[in-house]
Image (cartoon, helix red, strand yellow):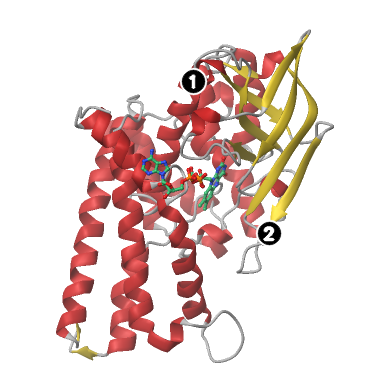
Amino acid sequence: MADLENFRADTRNWLEANAPSGLKGSSFSELEGTWGGRKWVFKNADQEAWLAIMAEKGFTAPTWPTEYGGGGLSADEAKVLRQEMSALRLPPALIGFGLTMIGPTLLRFGTEAQKLEHLPKICRGEIRWCQGYSEPGAGSDLAAVATRAERDGDDFIISGQKVWTSYADECDWIFALVRSDPDVKKQEGITFLLIDMDSPGVRVKPILLISGKSPFCETFFDAVRVPVANVVSEINAGWTVAKALLGHERSMIADAFGGGGGPKKASSGSLLAGLARKYAGTEGERVADPVLRDQVARAEMETQAFGLTVARSRDAAKAGHQPGPESSLFKIAATELNQKRYELMVQILGPQAVGWEGPGFEEDELDVTREWLRSRGNTIEGGTSEVQLNIIAKRVLGLPD
Ligand SMILES: Cc1cc2nc3c(=O)[nH]c(=O)nc-3n(C[C@H](O)[C@H](O)[C@H](O)COP(=O)(O)OP(=O)(O)OC[C@H]3O[C@@H](n4cnc5c(N)ncnc54)[C@H](O)[C@@H]3O)c2cc1C
């Protein structure tokens, strides 16, 4: 315990001395976070410096082993680091699918060569990863993936299409599920493959949404040559790897929308009471409208309770426990809570929540509108709520198919 308190003091001093002063006290929005990669453009010099400083120390991936670029911290030390960053209101130096999805998966299933090749680049924010799971005919029924992988010597030749690939146009590598054996039970003929997006034959087409943005892409593979050495785990054993990664993805989503105890996306929960006071007025410190006050208090309490539950599970995960079916429970709870909070915020803002851009709306108001629209996808991405309920019914409650 004394060791941990020493670590806390050292960490606080180190953060005080090394964090760019412009970042201290900043609130963090995912849209402004550093995703890294070859195409990444830093928003400012502080953001760039912060990534370099934290990566050098191994603090972008605090619990990963030092030989792969991590910090080699224990679960307790990593928690202290998060707490101290939170106390200074410092944003994470790096976010993204490398740290939250493919990194933990490689640590568990990757070969030594794959770990040494990819993990340090993830920690330094040099390579940005995207996820090539969904296809036009394989979403909830993910095991139906049809992108073909045909063996040719030491390579696979990949042909097919992925869809809804978030930020594929900004990413350098993709982890993909491919059909390596079409003649066996569908789950048994899938391989988990790492593909360099610069390989000849990879083409990315952004999907333009009504918001005018393109967060998704279609990703096409036209006879793309990929070394067999890029298979994670065994050929045709990709389904096990895919499910393990989904556990990390669901935990990451739950964590982003409510996990307590660390620097993360600005919590919509903490925004809520402030907005209620500002737009509905106050009686002393309290929100004036008693019905709204009750709604806000309930949402805040649910957020707190959920944050504590996720923090407990995160401690278990950091101590080496792999996410199990409980990640489905968290994913449903977090995403529905996030949607509820944004519905409430839009209700509070009234007509000020109908803007998209232009005069007459404050930037904070436009942020609420955008995040509210974005939250609609929360119950779809990473597996829909209906699919999570099926998993809970089967694997948590033990109900028959
Ligand atoms: C914001 C966002 C980001 C995403 N990013 C990525 C990404 O980076 N990479 C990637 O590969 N994919 C990504 N996706 C895709 C996502 O994983 C799929 O949209 C999701 O798995 C659902 O698949 P689908 O869209 O094909 O819907 P479908 O599977 O066609 O489902 C349609 C509806 O039917 C319901 N349904 C289907 N099967 C069942 C069942 N057995 N029981 C009950 N109900 C069922 C679903 O719940 C849903 O309501 C993203 C999606 C979103 C919204």
Q: Quadrant of residue 196?
A: top right
Report whether 277 appears left or right of 218: left
Q: Position of residue 241 (x, y in %)?
A: 49, 22
Give the quarter of the figure containing the C terminus.
top left
Report whether 212 appears left or right of 91: right
Q: Name the amino acid, label 2.
A: Ala
In-front residue for pair 176/261? 176
Is label 2 within 8 A of ligand 1 (CB to nearest ligand atom)? no
Report whether 367 appears left or right of 389: right
SS of the residue at dot 2? Answer: helix
Q: Nearer the viewer, mark 1 or mark 2?
A: 1
Query: Is residue 118 positioned above or below 354 on the image?
Result: above
Rate crowding at label 2 as few (under 14), some (14 to 19) or many (20 or more) other CA atoms within 10 Å.
few
Q: Which residue is mark 1?
A: 187
Q: Position of residue 37 (x, y in %)?
A: 69, 43
Query: Is residue 46 positioned above or below 346 on the image?
Result: above
Labelled disc at residue 45: 2
Q: Earlier in the sequence, mark 1 or mark 2?
A: 2
Q: Quadrant of residue 10?
A: top left
Query: Is residue 302 positioned above or below 326 on the image?
Result: below
SS of the residue at dot 1? Answer: helix
Give the quarter of the figure containing the N terminus.
top left
Query: Is residue 336 in view from this perspective?
Result: yes
Query: Is residue 64 in view from this perspective?
Result: no
Rate crowding at label 1 as few (under 14), some (14 to 19) or many (20 or more) other CA atoms within 10 Å.
some
